[in-house]
Image: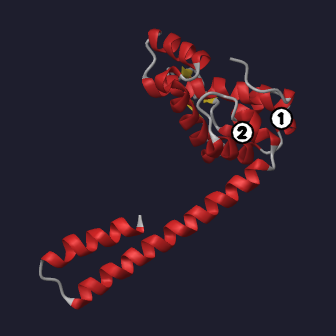
Amino acid sequence: MKVELLDIIYQQWFRGKRSVAQTQMLQSMVSLLLSMQEQLQAIEEQMQRLAEAFPEVELLKSIPGVGDKLAATIVSEIGDAQQFDDPKQLVAFAGLDPGVHSSGQFVATSNRITKRGSKRLRRALYLAVQCGLRRGTNPKLKGYYDKKRQEGKPYKVTVIACANKLLHHIYAILRKGQPYQT
């Protein structure tokens, strides 16, 4: 990466008229970018080492579409699955439970998710569903997705329903200590 950036600087930058200040600023920015990339690499390596210490991460990696980073994120956000008595509590913790809006005789026709829980967990689940649906990686999730789409549900509503279902699977995996069954 460093060599490519320097090649771009020498090939493209110096063709036109550039002041010394502009050249110095560009070199400083490239240096800063390379330093940030090195720091990011070190952080990712540290995350990988920490994730290997948790057996739950390996269990969640057995789910098609869930890799190292998503599994580590989900485990870190959920914590101990034993703190939840049933999967509905975990769904509420994630903020994926439907919020019912009614007052007196008014009953809302559309129910949205509450979003009261962990937004990082919701995002990780959303990404896990999208990865599981891509190219049919997760057949159980793909079947459920297709069923909901045939019912006429919009894409995002269906993906959130799949995230809810995936969270139920995750709850069972963490409580039983057994990998995902395809």
The answer to whether residue 157 is above or below residue 4 is above
Return the disc, 1 or 2, that comes first in the chain's sequence.
1
Q: Residue at x 34, y 80 (%)?
A: 27
Q: Horizontal and vertical percent for residue 135?
A: 47, 23
CB under 8 Å between discs 1 and 2: yes
Left or right: residue 72 compared with residue 103 = right
Left or right: residue 4 compared with residue 14 = right
Residue 23: name its quadrant: bottom left
- The answer to whether residue 102 of the structure is visible from this angle is no
Residue type marked 1: Phe
- The answer to whether residue 128 of the structure is visible from this angle is yes
Q: Horizontal and vertical percent for residue 170?
A: 73, 30
Q: Residues within 10 Å of mark 1 (few under 14, many from 20)?
A: some
Q: Which residue is mark 1?
A: 84
The answer to whether residue 76 is above or below residue 61 is below
- Whole-angstrom CA distance, mark 1 to mark 2, is 9 Å
**Image quadrant in which the C terminus is located:** top right
Q: Secondary structure at mark 2?
A: helix
Q: Which residue is mark 2?
A: 93
Count of numbered labels shown in the rendering: 2
Residue type marked 2: Phe
Q: Horizontal and vertical percent for residue 132?
A: 55, 27
